[in-house]
């Protein structure tokens, strides 16, 4: 095999790796966004309109307690997902750099010939 063929095959492989890592990044960002939407939904007021004042207040307090616990759980999930996004971004950046480097080599090799 010639250098040009080797570099072309390597460039194809690195492009596949880049596509895969970009897919992982998109997936991680989507999961993070979904969790952020869940936490935002907790801030919506509860619908306890048809109840008497005492029962409505009890429902509101119970929901508030549950929402605080759920918010704490989601914050941990969001922290983990944020770390996953940062890691996926780093991997995608590395893969992108490799693709760019191989494309540069291929261009220089074509110019030499």
Image: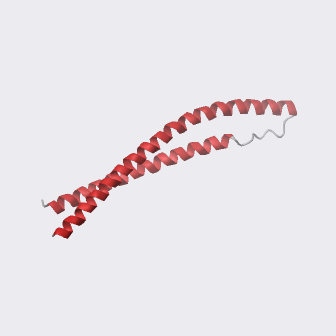
The picture places residue 1, in percent across and down from the top left corner, at: 12, 59
Residue 47's place in the image compared with 6, above or below, is: above
Observer-nearest residue: 88 or 58?
A: 88
Q: What colouring style does the render use?
A: secondary structure
Query: What residue sits 58% from the left and 32% below the top?
Result: 73
Residue extending furthest toward the left: 1
The picture places residue 43, in percent across and down from the top left corner, at: 69, 41
Residue 104's place in the image compared with 44, above or below, is: below
Query: What residue sits 85% from the left and 30% below the top?
Result: 54
Q: Is residue 61 left or right of residue 72?
A: right
Observer-nearest residue: 7 or 48?
A: 7
Q: Is residue 112 left or right of residue 21?
A: left
Observer-nearest residue: 104 or 62?
A: 104
Q: Is residue 112 left or right of residue 38?
A: left
The picture places residue 90, in percent across and down from the top left corner, at: 39, 46
The quarter of the picture where residue 14 lies is bottom left
Quadrant where the image shows the C terminus: bottom left
The quarter of the picture where residue 10 lies is bottom left
The quarter of the picture where residue 99 lies is bottom left
Q: Looking at the image, how many numbered discs can be counted on the residues?
A: 0
The picture places residue 81, in percent across and down from the top left corner, at: 50, 40
């Amino acid at each position: 095999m010639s250098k040009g063929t080797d570099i072309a095959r390597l460039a194809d492989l690195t492009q596949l790796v880049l596509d895969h890592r970009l897919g992982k990044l998109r997936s991680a960002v989507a999961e993070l966004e979904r969790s952020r939407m869940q936490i935002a939904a907790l801030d919506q007021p509860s619908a306890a309109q048809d109840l008497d004042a005492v029962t409505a207040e009890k429902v509101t307090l119970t929901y508030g307690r549950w929402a605080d616990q759920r918010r704490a759980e989601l914050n941990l999930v969001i922290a983990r997902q944020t770390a996953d996004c940062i890691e996926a971004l780093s991997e995608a950046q590395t893969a992108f750099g490799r693709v760019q480097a191989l494309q540069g080599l291929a261009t220089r090799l074509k110019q030499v010939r």
